[in-house]
Each structure stands twice: as C-alpha cells, then as structure tokens.
C-alpha cells in the first residue's frame, strides 16, 4: 500500500502530493526538504541531480521542479521505481530529463565509474545519498567511491554531495577528496554537505 511522501515545496510542480512506496520507506519530510533546497537553491538552475537510493524520488523531483536540467533516480526495488515514475507523471516532470534506473546504488555507481563517462554524457552537479539509516556501511561506501580521484568523472568541478543519515551515525568530516562543509539536524535526521577539496569556499 502506497504512503504519503509529502508535497513538492516550490517550483513548477509546487503543491503536488507525492506517493511513497510504503511504510518501510522514510521520505524526506517537508522541513528537511525546505532546508536542503534552500541551501542548494542557487545551484539548481540548469543543474544535473543524482538521487541515489531514491525512494519516492521526492528529492530529484523537487530539484526538477526548481529548475534542474536533469535528474537521475537510482533505486533497487522495482515497485519503488514504479512509484517514482508515477510521481514524475503526476508532477508533469517526466520525460528525457528524468531517468529512473533500477539498480543497487553501489553497483550502479561502480559501473558508472568503470565506464569512464558519466551517465547521459555530463557530470553531476548535485548528489543526494539517502540509504536506509541502518545501512551506515553503504553510506560510507558510496561517499568513499565518490571521494576517490576517479569520482571526478561523475562529479562536476563544483559539485555538492549531500548525505542524509541518522544523527548519531554522522559520516566522517573528511573522506578522500570530499570535505564536509556544513551539517543540519532535524530530530533524528541529519544532512551532511560535502564538497571536493579546494572548492569548499563559495
């Protein structure tokens, strides 16, 4: 049974309700979404957004609604991928600029790096990592992969990587070439923002 993943906060699809795949998912709350996209807002117009462990797709959909040029949704559950497609259709944001891929996040990321070329031909400007809270090892692995020198093939020169996690399980402030620049907490949920070394200012 589908649940409620909240609403699109702003942009062309503002106010549209989104479905969640079911009670086992933890969608972005409106409060978390508002803060996340208030910080990312200046970088959204024309940006390429990667939503890893996408769940309902709420983050990528919010990015598209606010002017992102492209969003890639990576989710391992087939039924959940269908919910993402339904949410894209409901918001009018489906099409060639919104790609849903059924794959395990780490497998997809590794394959994308081995391909030596980013999906759809250009690196990503914004990446959200949102695995289930109990999968702390997966979050660390995804961050470590993106933080390798080879991760630059997927990340734009001024890319931001955001990790959503349980507040007690904060990832390290420095992972390879990624450096934490800020953190925001909302009850049990925290967001940690990373940038590549040398781009932390601005």
Image: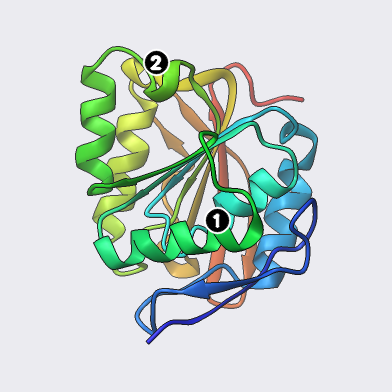
Query: Which numbered marker is on residue 153?
Result: 2
Q: Secondary structure at mark 2?
A: helix
Q: Residue 83: where, in percent of width, then height?
A: 42, 66
Label 1: few (<14), some (14–19) or many (≥20) C-alpha neighbours in 10 Å: many
| Quarter of the figure with residue 120 | top left
197 or 103, which lies in front? 103
Q: Residue 114: where, in percent of width, then height?
A: 21, 19
When the figure is inspected, residue 50 is found, relative to residue 178, above or below; the finding is below
* Residue at 60% in and 63% down: 90
State the CA–CA distance, disc 1 to disc 2: 27 Å
Q: Residue 57: where, in percent of width, then height?
A: 49, 57
* Residue at 32% in and 41% down: 142
* Residue at 47% in and 74% down: 20
Query: Which numbered marker is on residue 80?
Result: none
156 or 197, which lies in front? 156
* Residue at 54% in and 19% down: 156
Q: Secondary structure at mark 1?
A: helix
Residue 195 as seen in the image, left or right of residue 64: left
Tell me, yes or no, whether the two marked residues, 1 and 2, touch with CB atoms within 8 Å: no
Which residue is denoted by mark 1 in the rendering? 88
Residue 9 as seen in the image, left or right of residue 64: right
Residue 140 as seen in the image, left or right of residue 195: left
Question: The C terminus lies in which quarter of the figure?
Answer: top right
């Amino acid at each position: 049974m589908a649940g409620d993943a909240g609403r699109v906060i702003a942009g062309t699809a503002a106010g549209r309700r989104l479905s969640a795949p079911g009670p086992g998912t933890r969608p972005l709350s409106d409060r978390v979404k508002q803060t996340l996209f208030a910080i990312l807002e200046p970088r959204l117009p024309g940006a390429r957004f990667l939503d890893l462990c996408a769940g309902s797709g709420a983050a990528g959909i919010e990015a598209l609604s606010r002017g992102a040029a492209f969003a890639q949704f990576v989710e391992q559950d087939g039924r959940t991928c269908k919910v993402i497609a339904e949410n894209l259709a409901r918001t009018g944001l489906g099409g060639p600029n919104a790609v849903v891929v059924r794959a395990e996040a780490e497998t997809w990321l590794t394959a994308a790096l081995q391909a030596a070329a980013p999906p759809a031909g250009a690196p990503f400007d914004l990446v959200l990592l949102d695995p289930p809270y109990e999968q702390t090892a997966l979050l660390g692995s995804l961050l470590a992969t993106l933080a390798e020198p080879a991760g630059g093939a997927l990340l734009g020169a001024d890319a931001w990587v955001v990790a959503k996690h349980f507040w007690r399980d904060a990832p390290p402030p420095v992972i390879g070439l990624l450096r934490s620049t800020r953190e925001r907490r909302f009850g049990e949920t925290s967001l940690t923002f990373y940038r590549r070394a040398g781009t932390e200012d601005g």
